[in-house]
Amino acid sequence: MYASHNKDINRHKSFHPLTYRNLSRVERGLEEAEREQKAKEKRSAELRHDQEQRRYDDLVLASSADTMATQFAKFRQVENIFAAEADFAGKPTTPTVVAESNGSGLAFQKDPLDTNGIQKRSREDSEGSCPQGSTASSGTVTGSISRSDAVRLRKELDRIQKERHDPLRRVEQFQNRTVAAEAKRRVVEARARAQSSTEDVQKDMVRDRLQQLLDMKK
């Protein structure tokens, strides 16, 4: 009369093996979705920072009248991106072979770092051998600086350019100029009023004196 069935009454319970497997799959999916959401938020923050930096550079380019400052602000990001690659490429590790036309054949080119070290040592030796007055009077100056000094000067130049072309600093300078002009105008007006009042007092005194003289003649 009644058909038998194989329905599992514990199918939707948490302790059931299939249900536990489904729950673990759902939890893994939720964890993956959370990781993707965090990655998206991090990427959006990086893009927002890049957009703000680019907007600041565009504002500097628009408000700058100096060609050197414009070029510096235009290619600053590119130079920062490829700075590490340029430093790595500028350090040769092995000496190169150069073919010479006049001579017996091939010759090895010396490492520029070693040549710089030899030149530095020879310059120090020459400075130590000659007196201080002769070095001060010599007219030839190499002008070579170290890498750390170059990086420091570059950072200082970047900071000066930012302070020079900062929009907030320009607004502050404009406000200071406006306040100074208004103060100067008020000082000039006060001096003019004081001078006019003194002139009026002098005219009144002259008028009174003339009236006294006329009264004495009568």
Image (tube, rainbow, N blue to C red):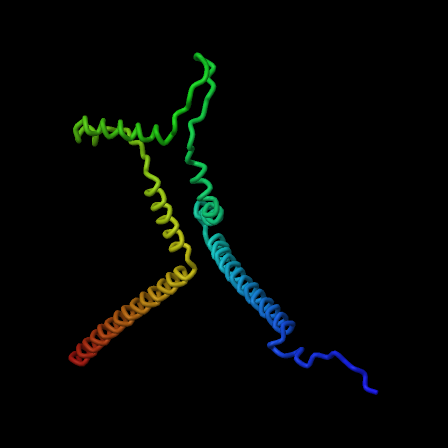
Position of the N terminus by quadrant? bottom right
Name which quarter of the figure residue 169 lies in: bottom left
Nearest the eye: 97 or 140: 97
> At x 30% / y 66%, what residue is drawn?
188
* Residue 160 position in % (x across, y down): 36, 52
For residue 72, above or below residue 99? below
* Residue 62 position in % (x across, y down): 49, 54
Q: Is residue 56 left or right of residue 119?
A: right
Q: Is residue 93 left or right of residue 143?
A: right
> At x 26% / y 69%, what residue is drawn?
195
Nearest the eye: 163 or 12: 12
* Residue 184 position in % (x across, y down): 31, 65
Position of the C terminus by quadrant? bottom left
Q: Residue furthest bottom?
A: 1
Q: Is residue 204 left or right of residue 97?
A: left
> At x 42% / y 33%, what residue is drawn?
92
Q: Residue furthest right?
A: 1
For residue 66, above or below residue 19? above
For residue 97, above or below residue 56? above
The mark total stands at: 0
* Residue 8 position in % (x across, y down): 70, 79
Nearest the eye: 81 or 155: 81
For residue 64, above or below residue 119? below
Nearest the eye: 28 or 186: 28
Name which quarter of the figure residue 23 lies in: bottom right
